Image (cartoon, helix red, strand yellow):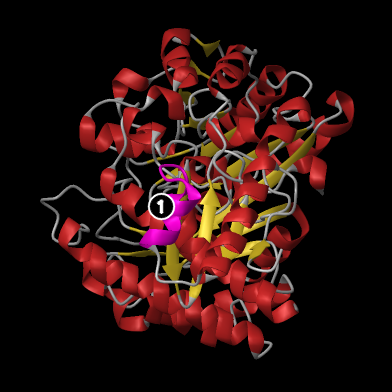
Amino acid sequence: MKRVKTLTGNKTYAVSMCKGGCGECQTSCQSACKTSCTVGNQTCENNK
Amino acid sequence: MVHQYKNNGYNIVMDICSGAIHVVDDVVYDVVALFEDNALDAIKEQLPYGESEVEEAYQEVQELKEQGLLFTDDIYEDYIKEVKERKTVVKALCLHIAHDCNLACRYCFAEEGEYKGDRALMSAEVGKAALDFLVRSSGNRHNLEVDFFGGEPTMNFGVVKEVVEYGRSLEKKYDKHFRFTLTTNGILLNDEIMEFANKEMDNVVLSVDGRKEVNDYMRPTRNGKSSYDIIMPKFIRFAESRHQQKYYVRGTFTRRNLDFSKDVIHLADLGFEQISMEPVVGLPEEPYAIREEDLPQIFEEYDRLAKEIIKRNQEGKGFNFFHFMIDLTGGPCVAKRLSGCGSGTEYLAVTPWGDLYPCHQFVGEEQFLLGNVFDGIKRTDICDEFRQCNVYTKDKCRECFARFYCSGGCAANSYKFHGVIDDAYELSCEMERKRVECAIMIQAALAQERE
């Protein structure tokens, strides 16, 4: 495309419905939160 | 749902429900805004561009829609219901190793470590029982997370060491791996603790608010002296000894330092490469609490910080700012993104005497006492209430573009401001939305650089 650059590639959230939810990831407060909730910056254990 | 915004010269279009993020030119940006409610001819009439330009842009927008990367629907509500009905296991504990502290921080939600109770240190017996509880409550989950938290955990460091040693002894037997984190204010940090932490702690969180005057006002010692002078040389050395990885210097900003980007930059200038700086959570009557009228300045600070991060990255002296970190091609699955933070179900806090609470911020709120590490959870009704929390149970979240990034926000904040766990703390939401926008803009800039 000439006018659009997609930063996320073709992978969408819907793809992760099949294999997602394994629960091996950290809970959000275990990094440096403790008074808020941030999950968008967390790592999927299966993508490591 | 689409969210579009301009920041630092980038036109960004987020397709919220697919997760797709597009950087677009001006024509596409304007076409996207009109696309759903207008036919091509009507769009042409409304926009100040040439016909062929609009046609080309329209075609690209149409293509994205056909690829499922724009104007997608939220299809996850039933899926999240199903995820939430799955049996959960406890995978993380926050151990309150010491309900005591050697600082007197003005904003402390733990009330200088005492959490509405008496000063107390966790015994090794309670710590070990907590790990036993975690192992038997964790099902097939291999990685188990344990935070040594306080108050100040180094005031009871002998127990930290004993609990870690005990944890290691359980790993092989039960096929588990403990990932330990130590959160410390640094006052008692010494070579022995650093050496131990570098061997055993997967992560360390070093509490400091940035510039000396800012830090020392909010984080004085018990006798009113500077904590900065005591901790900073040690934190610098500690971060270096961990090769600038697997740690955070973590600060809190308040309305006394709304120019908090300077505090983050100060920490970066000292050589720290992993930095977190969170807005204080305080009730409106507190003089340090963030107010709605502070938001414009806070947003400007986030913008300033984002630009500085891009600049430093270009100069080869980049650093990570926790709240701007975002993985656009990997990142968590949609179940994780929408199902809440896990407090009260997957993540629990343990008091020095072994009581269990939904998270560290609920400790001392007696109506949230769940049970204890010896007898297990008795109040499963409270856990069920927390389990139900997710973005679809919160009206304020359902239409928010940031819901896939915050998972519905912090239950403790909701309780603090609204008296219920399934509401949202609006000021925090406003700041979260701004941080998401900045984080994505940074990715757009870095992607442009790579080209």
Work out which quarter of the rendered image holds the C terminus of chain B and state it.
bottom right
Most extreme residue toward the left is B285
Type of secondary structure dominating the magenta stretch: helix
Residues in magenta, as a range: B33-46
Q: Along the horizontal axis of the image, is B72 left or right of B328?
A: left
Figure quadrant of residue B394? top left
Q: Is residue A23 above or below residue B277?
A: above
- In the image, is residue B42 part of the stretch drawn in magenta? yes
- In the image, is residue B17 part of the stretch drawn in magenta? no
Figure quadrant of residue B446? bottom right
Q: Residue A37: percent from the left, percent from the top? A: 46, 44
Most extreme residue toward the right is B172
Residue count near mark 1 (Cα–Cα under 10 Å), binned few <14, some 14–19, many ≥20:
few
The chain that hosts pointer 1 is B
Residue position marked by numbered label 1 in the rendering:
B42
Task: State the residue at coordinates (60%, 59%).
Answer: B22
Q: Amino acid at mark 1?
A: Ala
Q: Along the horizontal axis of the image, is B200 left or right of B286?
A: right
Task: State the residue at coordinates (64%, 13%).
Answer: B86
Q: Secondary structure at mark 1?
A: helix
Q: Along the horizontal axis of the image, is B243 left or right of B122?
A: right
